[in-house]
Image (cartoon, rainbow, N blue to C red):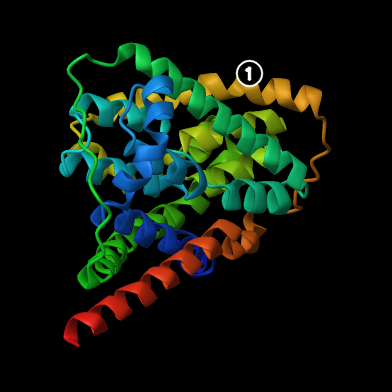
């Protein structure tokens, strides 16, 4: 158990915090500064026709695809609490805006676990297609009395970035706490699974990193796609505060994850048939070092954007004092 906690600490420091923290700050800033509403003007025709959602949802959809698991759900709950989404709209978005980011799927699963980035790209594309298909199908379950939010101008306030950093820090502490908890018990599940195949499902469903690593060794590569879409109970617990805020029950959320798994499986199977690739799994399941996850290109871009916002905020604060 102690070894599992040490692995969890390494995972948090080496992968989770560097790759997620910039997105957590950026996503919070987008909502607080009304930037999402400004960007939503351009995406409104697309989101309304494709998903029957207001333009402000576009940033949450995009960030959910490139930012990693908690980012999309966090933005949805903030949009709902701010009155930009109705309850039914927020619940529908929860069905397809909980996705693993490209840094993890391509870098960690593809390059590290399967020793083939092409496999990671196919898995990421499969997940993206599945999410967009479910999002499109959800439009047929939308209610006619959904809110339509009036356009709001982008506002810059020197306190916005400070509040975003504080909020993101609290969210990261919650995420890391759950990672450590599941990392402590996961090695025990792996040992049980080595002796009894009945525990295989528990390993796969418990935590997404360990689940993907286990699936990479024991299952066909296309079956990793459902593991990614399920995302693991550790991620579910991280998302629980945001799920509750929009009035979604945990069983309904689990149903949404199961639907994602069912939709992504034939897509992944079909894409691997069209674009076959050889997956050479690492020698030891317990030796996963997810270093590609810590050098995420999207996260680096997010850091650059945050740096630009910081400079703007400092300049505005200085101008106000003068």
Can you see residue 234? no
Q: Quadrant of the C terminus?
A: bottom left
Q: Residue at x 25, y 71 (%)?
A: 162
Q: Is residue 198 left or right of residue 79?
A: right
Task: Identify the image quadrant of the N terminus.
Answer: bottom left
In the displayed structure, 44 sits above or below 102; it is above
Position of 182 compared to 193: left or right? left
Q: Position of residue 172 (x, y in %)?
A: 34, 62
Closest to the observer, 308 or 247: 308
Q: Is residue 146 visible?
A: yes
Quadrant of residue 296 in the image?
bottom right
Residue situated furthest bottom in the rendering: 322
Q: Quadrant of residue 121?
A: top right
Asked if residue 212 is positioned above or below residue 268 in the image, the reply reads below
Nearest to the observer: residue 161 or residue 39: 39
Q: Position of residue 246 (x, y in %)?
A: 20, 35
What residue lies at 47% left-to-right and 48% top-to-bottom? 68
Q: Position of residue 81 (x, y in %)?
A: 16, 43
Crowd class of label 1 (few under 14; some 14 to 19; many from 20; radius 10 Å): some
Residue at 49%, 41% in the rendered image: 65
């Amino acid at each position: 158990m102690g070894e599992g906690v040490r692995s969890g600490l390494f995972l948090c420091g080496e992968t989770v915090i560097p790759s997620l923290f910039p997105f957590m700050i950026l996503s919070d800033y987008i909502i607080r500064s009304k930037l999402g509403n400004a960007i939503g003007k351009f995406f409104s025709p697309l989101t309304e026709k494709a998903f029957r959602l207001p333009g402000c949802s576009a940033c949450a959809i995009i960030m959910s695809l490139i930012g990693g698991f908690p980012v999309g759900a966090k933005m949805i709950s903030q949009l709902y609490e701010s009155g930009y989404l109705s309850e039914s709209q927020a619940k529908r978005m929860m069905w397809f805006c909980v996705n693993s980011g490209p840094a993890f799927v391509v870098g960690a699963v593809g390059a590290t676990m399967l020793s083939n980035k092409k496999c990671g790209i196919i898995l990421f594309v499969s997940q993206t297609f599945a999410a967009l298909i479910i999002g499109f199908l959800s439009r047929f379950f939308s209610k006619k009395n959904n809110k339509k939010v009036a356009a709001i101008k982008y506002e810059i306030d020197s306190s916005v970035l400070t509040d975003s950093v504080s909020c993101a820090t609290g969210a990261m502490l919650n995420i890391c706490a759950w990672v450590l908890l599941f990392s402590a018990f996961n090695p025990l599940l792996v040992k049980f699974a080595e002796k009894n195949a009945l525990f295989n499902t528990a390993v796969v469903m418990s935590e997404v990193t360990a689940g993907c690593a286990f699936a990479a060794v024991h299952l066909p590569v296309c079956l990793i796609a459902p593991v990614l879409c399920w995302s693991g109970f550790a991620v579910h617990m991280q998302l629980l505060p945001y799920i509750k805020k929009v009035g979604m029950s945990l069983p309904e959320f689990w149903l949404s994850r199961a639907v994602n798994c069912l939709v992504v499986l034939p897509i992944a199977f079909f894409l691997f048939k069209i674009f076959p690739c050889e997956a050479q799994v690492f020698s030891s399941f317990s030796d996963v070092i997810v270093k590609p996850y810590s050098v995420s290109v999207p996260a680096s871009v997010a850091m650059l954007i945050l740096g630009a916002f910081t400079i703007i905020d400092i300049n505005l604060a200085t101008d106000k004092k003068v």
